[in-house]
Image (cartoon, helix red, strand yellow):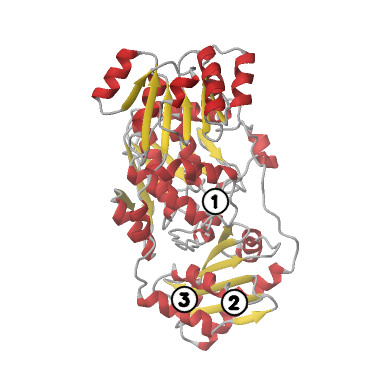
């Protein structure tokens, strides 16, 4: 059984004891304050009165595996640490350096203890978080929220995936902290089995909007996980936007009072964790679980476009999340239509070098395309997959890549951007193309199949070989958080200093993506695969 020894009393020592009592093992306190020792005993804590710097007093305590030196006096802590090192050299030693400790005292503690908790450094880090870039960004966000007169509509991209949904729900929590009521809204549908389980099990209150919905009842509009109204959402293109939070690389100027576009992170959920931490908002179980799942899905279990910030956000969320609910979300049943689509994609696949392309014909669930593209990518010696099908007069395309330098988002934009909408990440993208007059042809007609093969396959293969596609990064300066004062001028934006959310969907755009989604695909209005 693990034995822990805490030296001292006071707020820090008290917090340590309170936390350690909840864990398995034995906790003993040694302190010179007899009244405090008496109180601890009354509370059921094993406490002894004695000088924590006295080696004899230390030897009288049960032999510890871990010792925490936590008095409020720096000199006492230095002497106590030295005594512990002498009496219990094999024990893990944690020492506290009060803010008033001298440099020599800090050096002495660092030389003796295995770990030092420095109050001055902790205070500096706390200030850096609130005064540095993250702090400035968060203050601008809260200032924008407080300036909104009325309720806020937080709009996710079409057919939202877990990252978009969780980010929107978390932004609503941030807005609540700023005194603003908010509705989480979306266009399209949530059909992927994991995403339905995600929303239902976490009991998220979402508002489904009809295309072209009038949001005049709201005092403001925020876009999450995409960045332009009318691109990968059903909003009118001229909708004024107050807030944009997204992790997709923009291609055109993003117009909003507050803009946070950070394409170096793997999920928009990671950005929302930054806000929560900076504002000292402890996420509820539902919010934390949603954000954690959003990061896991968008980074494909931390294997795709993951950053240090994504891991840090995960570490922060884990203690607040519900692991049991995550397991239930990740084990939903697959509907027969999805299974049929995957089967058609496998049987109809055509190989072109290391690329596999497959048309599945008529769709009943377009989100199944993403899952089919992911499954095909598991085949040996395959680095790129593209699956397409028809639904309601539109060709939907989902593409995946692994182990290749090809940028799928740029490739699909080249292939289909002039005849439809397309975009996404380097390894996950999608497109949507209206059939137009071809819609009159039956989906099972061989002539339509040939035409679609020419439209989709030929264009994609031509784009694959046309040029080296690269990811757009660094479009906005690090300190740019909106188009207000200090933001790029109109000329700057026209000349390319800004990027747009056109692609936002691009990668994630798609919508509802679950574990393997095409949200990525969504992009530019482009695909909206759910996961």
Q: Nearer the viewer, residue 232 or 236?
A: 232
Of badges 1 and 2, the one in the foreground is: 2
The residue pinned by badge 3 equals: 439
Q: Position of residue 249 (x, y in %)?
A: 60, 48
Instruction: Say few, some or many: other residues with alpha carbon within 10 Å of mark 2 (under 14 / 14 to 19 / 20 or more).
Output: few
Residue 137's mark?
none
Q: Earlier in the sequence, mark 3 or mark 2?
A: 2
Left or right, 168 with respect to 101, comes to left
- Tell me, yes or no, whether the two marked residues, 3 and 2, touch with CB atoms within 8 Å: no
Q: Nearer the viewer, residue 468 or 305?
A: 305
Can you give x and y, in whole percent of width and height, for residue 453 in the image? 59, 79
SS assignment at label 2? loop
Whole-number angstrom distance, CA of label 3 to CA of label 1: 28 Å
Foreground: disc 3 or disc 1: 1
- Write down the residue under mark 2: 379
Q: Is residue 462 visible in the rendered structure shown here?
A: yes
Left or right, 382 with reference to 311: right
According to the picture, the residue beneath numbered tag 1 turns out to be: 504
Up-down: is 302 above or below 489? below
Mark 1 or mark 3, which is nearer the start of the sequence? 3
Q: Secondary structure at mark 1?
A: helix
Give the farthest residue toward the bottom. 446
* Point 58% across, 84% down: residue: 450
Marks 1 and 2, how far apart at CA: 29 Å
- Dividing the picture into quadrants, the one containing residue 326 is bottom left
Q: Which badge, 1 or 2, comes first in the chain's sequence?
A: 2
Furthest toward the right, the residue is: 467
Residue shown at 44% from the left, 83% from the top:
442
**Is residue 154 visible from the viewing direction of this image?**
no
């Amino acid at each position: 059984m693990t034995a822990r020894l805490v030296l001292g009393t006071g707020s820090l020592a008290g917090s340590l004891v309170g936390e350690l009592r909840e864990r398995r093992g034995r906790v003993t306190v040694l302190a010179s304050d007899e009244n405090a020792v008496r109180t601890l005993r009354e509370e059921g804590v094993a406490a002894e009165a004695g000088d924590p710097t006295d080696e004899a007093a230390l030897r009288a305590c049960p032999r510890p595996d871990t010792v925490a030196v936590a008095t409020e006096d720096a000199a006492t802590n230095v002497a106590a640490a030295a005594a512990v090192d002498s009496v219990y050299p094999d024990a893990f030693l944690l020492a506290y350096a009060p803010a008033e400790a001298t440099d020599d005292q800090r050096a002495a503690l660092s030389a003796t203890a295995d770990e030092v908790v420095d109050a001055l450094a902790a205070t500096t880090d706390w200030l850096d978080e609130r005064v540095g870039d993250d702090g400035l960004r968060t203050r601008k966000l809260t200032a924008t929220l407080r300036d909104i007169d009325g309720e806020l509509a937080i709009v996710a991209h079409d057919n939202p995936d877990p990252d978009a949904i969780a980010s929107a729900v978390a932004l609503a929590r941030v807005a609540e902290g700023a005194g603003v009521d908010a509705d989480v809204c979306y266009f399209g549908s949530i059909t992927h089995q994991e995403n339905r389980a995600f929303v239902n099990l976490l009991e998220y209150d979402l508002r489904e909007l009809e295309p072209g919905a009038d949001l005049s009842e709201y005092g403001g509009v925020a876009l999450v996980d995409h960045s332009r109204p009318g691109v990968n959402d059903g909003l009118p293109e001229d909708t004024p936007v107050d807030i944009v939070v997204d992790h997709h690389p923009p291609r055109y100027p993003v117009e909003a009072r507050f803009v946070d576009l950070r394409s170096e992170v793997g999920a928009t959920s990671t950005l929302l964790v930054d806000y929560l931490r900076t504002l000292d908002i402890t996420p509820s179980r539902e919010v934390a679980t949603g954000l954690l799942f959003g990061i896991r899905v968008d980074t494909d279990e931390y294997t795709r476009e993951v950053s240090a910030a994504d891991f840090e956000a995960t570490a922060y969320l884990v203690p607040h999340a519900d692991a049991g609910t995550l397991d239930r979300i990740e084990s939903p049943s697959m509907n027969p239509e999805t299974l049929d689509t995957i089967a058609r994609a496998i049987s109809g696949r055509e190989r072109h070098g290391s690329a596999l392309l497959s048309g599945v014909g008529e769709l009943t669930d377009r989100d199944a395309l993403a899952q089919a593209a992911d499954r095909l990518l598991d085949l040996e010696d395959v680095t790129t997959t593209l699956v397409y099908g028809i639904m309601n007069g539109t060709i939907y395309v989902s593409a995946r890549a692994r182990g290749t330098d090809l940028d799928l988002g740029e490739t699909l934009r080249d292939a289909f951007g002039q005849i439809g909408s397309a975009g996404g990440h380097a390894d996950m993208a999608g497109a949507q193309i209206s059939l137009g007059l071809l819609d009159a042809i039956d989906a099972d007609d061989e002539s339509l199949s040939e035409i679609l093969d020419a439209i989709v396959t030929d264009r994609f293969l031509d784009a694959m070989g046309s040029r080296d596609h690269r990811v757009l990064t660094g479009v906005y300066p690090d300190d740019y958080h909106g188009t207000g004062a200090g933001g790029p001028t109109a000329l700057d934006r026209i000349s390319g200093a800004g990027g747009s959310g056109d692609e936002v969907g691009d990668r994630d755009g798609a919508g509802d993506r679950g574990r393997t989604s095409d949200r990525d695909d969504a992009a530019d209005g482009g695909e909206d695969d759910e996961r």
